[in-house]
Image (cartoon, rainbow, N blue to C red):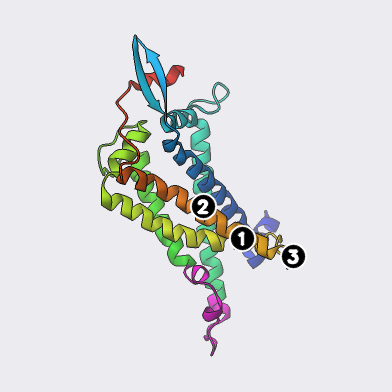
Amino acid sequence: MNRLAKFYASSIGKKFIAAITGLILFGFVAGHVAGNLKVFTGTDSITAEGETFAVPHIDQYGHFLRKAGEPFLPAMAFLWTSRLVLLASVILHMTVVIQLSLKSAEARPVEYVRSKKKASSWSARYMMFSGSVILAFIIFHILHFTTGTIKLGQFEHGAIYKNLRNSFSLWYVSLGYVLVMGLLTSHLFHGVWSLFQTLGFDSPDRNKAIRMFAMVASIGITVGFALVPLAFLFGVLQEVPDYPHHLLENH
């Protein structure tokens, strides 16, 4: 434990933790956007009691996540384990980044005559700002689409497609989500680039490729997220008739 505490107390240890937790969070947003894009893949026709219902793929995906791990794990166990890992990653990531920032400020109490900020990118200079906004957005997003505590349009647990359509048909909701996604581009670009540096993968031979990957990944993820509210807002994705949710249990 003493060795672990010393590692955490060191700048190298904090940077390593920031990189690993950042990698976990990057993997989550990449998986999350892939799941969100299921709104574009259509529906399955499921027949029950002599009637045929159109069930959106994204609703089936949500049901799969809730039941993942069965019968070896109880329902929702896998999902809640994933959520707790993500929560721990967010807390650790925020904590070490703030500590590193404070330590850097203490080590340089007097500003340089010629500020280094001019040499750094916009995304690097405003990481704390973009990260704070994204954190507030995550809390809002959970209260909006997971718990239904914040109601912007009608909300029904388990009806993912319907909830997305009800909310994103409101222009101000879609606009807010798209604006935050713009900040996500900036945060991801610098974050992905930095984690490769911290983990020791950067080199003069690879830096161009790493930078390109960071750019493509950050823009691709952001565009993927933004496409969903925009598609609902502009009527590209239509309303799907209600279906009995017990259909998913046997499908």
User: Percent x, y for residue 251?
Assistant: 46, 19
Left or right of 34 in this view: 23:
right
Q: Does the magenta-highlighted stretch encompass residue 108?
A: yes
Q: Identify the magenta region.
A: 105-126
The answer to whether any part of residue 13 appears in the image is no
Q: Secondary structure at mark 1?
A: helix
Residue marked by disc 1: 212
Q: Is residue 242 above or below residue 198?
A: above
Question: Of residues 64 and 112, which is closer to you in this image?
Answer: 64
Q: Earlier in the sequence, mark 3 or mark 1?
A: 3
Left or right of 53 in this view: 114:
right
Residue marked by disc 3: 205
Which kind of residue does numbered mark 1 sit on?
A: Met
CB atoms of marks 3 and 1 within 8 Å: no
User: Percent x, y for residue 221?
Assistant: 50, 51
Which kind of residue does numbered mark 2 sit on?
A: Gly
Q: Secondary structure at mark 2?
A: helix
The answer to whether any part of residue 159 appears in the image is yes
CB atoms of marks 2 and 1 within 8 Å: no
Left or right of 85 in this view: 50:
left
Residue visible at 54% across and 88% down in the picture = 114
Residue marked by disc 2: 220
Q: 10 Å neighbourhood of mark 2: few (<14), some, or many (≥20)?
A: some
Q: Earlier in the sequence, mark 2 or mark 1?
A: 1
Report which quarter residue 195 is drawn in. bottom right
Cα–Cα gap, marks 2 and 1:
12 Å
Which kind of residue does numbered mark 3 sit on?
A: Asp
